[in-house]
Amino acid sequence: MTGAASGLGAALTAAFRERGDEVLATDRVAGSSVEGGIDLVLDITSDDDWAAAVDAVRERWGGLDVLVNNAGVAGGGRVDRCTIEEWQWITEVNLFGLVRGTRAFTPMLKQQRSGHLVNVASLAGLVHPGGMGSYNATKAAVVAFTETCGHELASYGIRASVVCPSYFRTNLMDSMQGSDELVGQVVGGLVERSRTTAEEIAAAVLAGIDAGDDVIVPDEAARQAYFLKWADRPAYDAVMRAQAAKLEALSEGTS
C-alpha cells in the first residue's frame, strides 16, 4: 500500500487489516495516522525504494496478493497557466510513480501466476473538467495503463482494477501545487464541502476488489457524472463547458 500515512491510503490500510489481511504500509514520510505506523518508507519516484519494497515483501511473505498504488498528488491549472515544470512534477508522481511500482512487482506476480493490481486514479481519469488538464491527463493515463495491464497479464492469472472516486474529504489538497491559484481554491472548496469520507470510499473499493471489477467508481457523485458522459454526451459537454466558463468569470472578477 503506497501513500498509507493518511487519507485514502490510511483508510484502505485499516479496512484491509480489519478483515484480517496483512498489509505492508508504505509512505514517503515516516509519520502516520495509520494504526501501527508505516512499515516502510517508500518514495514512489525512486526505483531503489521500489526494489527495497519488493525485497521486504519477498522476505515477509514470499509473494503478494494485492498491490495498491494509491500515492499521488493534486495539481492543475488552465492550459495557458499551468507550467511545463508543473506538468513534469505531477506526471512524475501520479503516472511514473505508479508505473515504477507496477514494473517492480510484475515479475513476482508473473512468477506466482496470481495477484491483483489496484491503481487509484480519480473520476478525473474518466470525466475531464476545465482547469485540470495536467491532473486529468495523468489520471486518464492511469486508467489506460491499468486496462492495458489487465489485458497483458490476464494469461498469468493477474487482475487489474482502477479506482475512480469523486471529491471526498481527505488531505490530498496539502500536496496541491500550481501557479493557477484560483483552480486550487475551487478544487479545495469542492473537497471541503464533500460529505463522503475516506472510510466510505475504502469500503467501496474493497467491495469492488472482491467483486473483480475492472473499473471501480466508488461513490454516487462519481457514478452520476460518469453515467452522464456515457448516456448523454451533449449534456455532459454543456456541463463541463459551463464549469469552465464559470472559472474564467471568477478569474476576471478577481483580476
Image (cartoon, rainbow, N blue to C red):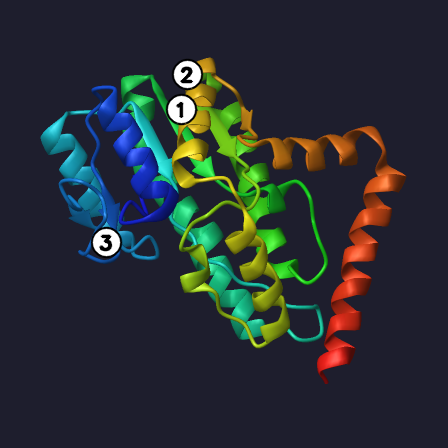
Query: Can residue 83 be seen by looking at this rendering?
Result: no
The span from disc 3 to disc 1 (Cα, nearest Å) is 29 Å
Specify the quadrant that holds the C terminus: bottom right
Q: Is residue 75 left or right of residue 224?
A: left
Q: Quadrant of residue 183?
A: bottom right
Amino acid marked by disc 3: Asp
- Name the one closer to the observer, 228 or 126: 228
Return the x and y of residue 139 as percentages of the image width and height: 56, 47
Amino acid marked by disc 1: Leu
- The residue sitting at the bottom extreme is 255
- Which of the two labelled residues, at mark 2 and mark 3, occupies the earlier sequence position? 3
Circles 1 and 2 in contact, beta carbons < 8 Å? yes
The correct choice, above or below, for 219 with respect to 33 in the image is above
Circles 3 and 1 in contact, beta carbons < 8 Å? no
Image point (53%, 70%), residue name: 86
Judge depth for marks 2 and 3 and give the one in front.
2
Image point (56%, 66%), residue name: 87
Image point (62%, 63%), residue name: 186
Return the x and y of residue 165 as percentages of the image width and height: 54, 38
Q: Quadrant of residue 147?
A: top right
Which residue in the protein does label 1 denote? 206
Which residue in the protein does label 2 denote? 210
- Name the one closer to the observer, 151 or 21: 21
- Name the one closer to the observer, 249 or 1: 249
Return the x and y of residue 234 as percentages of the image width and height: 89, 40
Q: Is residue 190 left or right of residue 25?
A: right
Image point (51%, 66%), residue name: 88
Element on which disc 1 rests: helix
Judge depth for marks 3 and 1 and give the one in front.
1
- Name the one closer to the observer, 72 or 181: 181
